[in-house]
Image (spheres, rainbow, N blue to C red):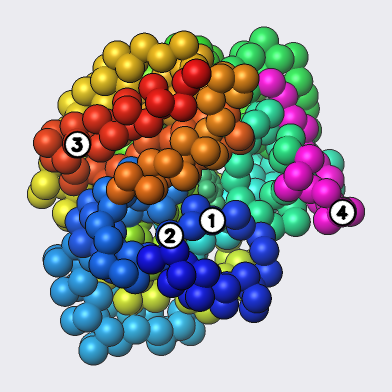
Amino acid sequence: RQERIMHVGELERRYGAQNYLPIPVVLSRGEGVWLWDDQGRKYLDMMSAYSAVSPGHSHPRLVAALVEQAHRLAVPSRAFMNDKLGPLMERLVSLTGLDKVLPMNTGAEAVETAIKAARRWAYQVKGVAQNQAEILVASGNFHGRTTTIVGFSSEDAYRQDFGPFTPGFRILPFGDLAAFEAAVGPNTAAILIEPIQGEAGIRVPPAGFLKGLRQLCDRKNVLLILDEVQSGLGRTGKWFAYQHEDVLPDGVILGKALGGGLLPVSAFVGKAEIMDLFNPGSHGSTFGGNPLASAVALEALNVIEDEQLVTRSAVLGQHLKQRLLAIGSPAIRDVRGLGLWVGVELDPALADARRVCERLAQRGVLTKETHETVVRFAPPLTITRQELDWGLDVVAETINEATP
Ligand code: PMP
């Protein structure tokens, strides 16, 4: 197996840009919560492709929807209407409680869409002078990798040598409501924020933060735009993380799990007041809203509903968190998250997160470290308690062993 990793991995190493540091496993098949490498060895997936594979790998209903639609019509472009996009839009509106949808492909594209929407709203509705609109974002944010988006990242590694960047953003401490209150001014168009930060290491803000932002935005006529690319569609034990604090944002960004783990599908969903500012020619994408993506996305939402994956995430998520807390290793500094989305922060002096992930992979459990100190657990929402327990036994053993 080691030889094979060298050989196939060598192709990626030799011909690929080295913008990732993958765990040394060469995957070639997936089914449900399980993955197999090219030598037939089986692994439990405990990260779901950064939460994109909520219904599990190659869910039969989603594969069927994909194949059927691929035979019918895949990509006609939005030069024409198609018979699959409307039903998806209607469903997203009813799920979110918002009014209208602009479909895209990747999370970053939908974030860019939200930024354009907020700026247009600032100029056309709020009356901000041209080019003066400001968007407030949070430290530790992750919204994607375009030059505009990394321009307001607080991670130097994401920005290094990629400037100049798009102006008009201000970074404030995540979770610090007073800092946001102090920063809002007449030119503030929007607050753009993840309700729970994923890439930062599953950082949960203090209770009331989101509600406080909502009230602030209402008072000061500012849009609240939530990036639920990673937290949305059941991951936290509710359809949307904003439902934990009973708020409604003005716009929500969806991606990842919207594609059912098969395709890139994203969307910006917002109130009519914002969405109606888009007019022909103002925005678009060759692939956004195509019937192949739309058919799979609609079926992905059906699967989440029919298999009660949101409740499952809430119930099994508690179990996941309790069992991770129960490991009780001195190397564990924090266990945090909601639903089947939990980060374990390790003390780097006692246990190396990367090393833990490599050891886990050797033992048949796949996940990935984030920010050197956090190991993330985000299995497909279809995981059974038994499968979860099997994985957690391996996790406990590995973390205990890594601790001197
Ligand atoms: N927003 C959030 C909250 C994310 O976690 C990610 C991806 N990790 C993105 C946006 C970007 O999505 P994509 O990689 O599909 O562009």
* Residue type highlighted by circle 2: Val
Classify 10 Å Cα crowding around label 4: few (below 14), some (14-19), many (20 and above).
Answer: few
The percent coordinates of residue 134 (x first, y second) are 76, 37
Q: Name the side, left or right, on which 346 lies relative to 294.
A: right
Name the residue tied to disc 3. Answer: 390
Name the residue tied to disc 2. Answer: 25
* Residue type highlighted by circle 1: Pro
Q: Secondary structure at mark 4?
A: loop
Looking at the image, tell me whether mark 4 or mark 1 is earlier in sequence order: 1
The percent coordinates of residue 147 (x first, y second) are 75, 56
Displayed quadrant of residue 135:
top right
Looking at the image, tell me whether mark 2 or mark 4 is earlier in sequence order: 2
* Closer to the eye: label 4 or 3: 3
Picture residue at 32% right of the left edge, 76% below the top: 292
Name the residue tied to disc 4. Answer: 161
* Residue type highlighted by circle 3: Trp
Give the CA separation, mark 1 to mark 2.
Answer: 8 Å
- CB under 8 Å between discs 4 and 1: no
Give the CA separation, mark 4 to mark 1.
Answer: 23 Å
Name the residue tied to disc 1. Answer: 22
Question: From which residue to which does the magenta span run?
Answer: 156-173
* Residue type highlighted by circle 4: Asp
- CB under 8 Å between discs 1 and 2: yes
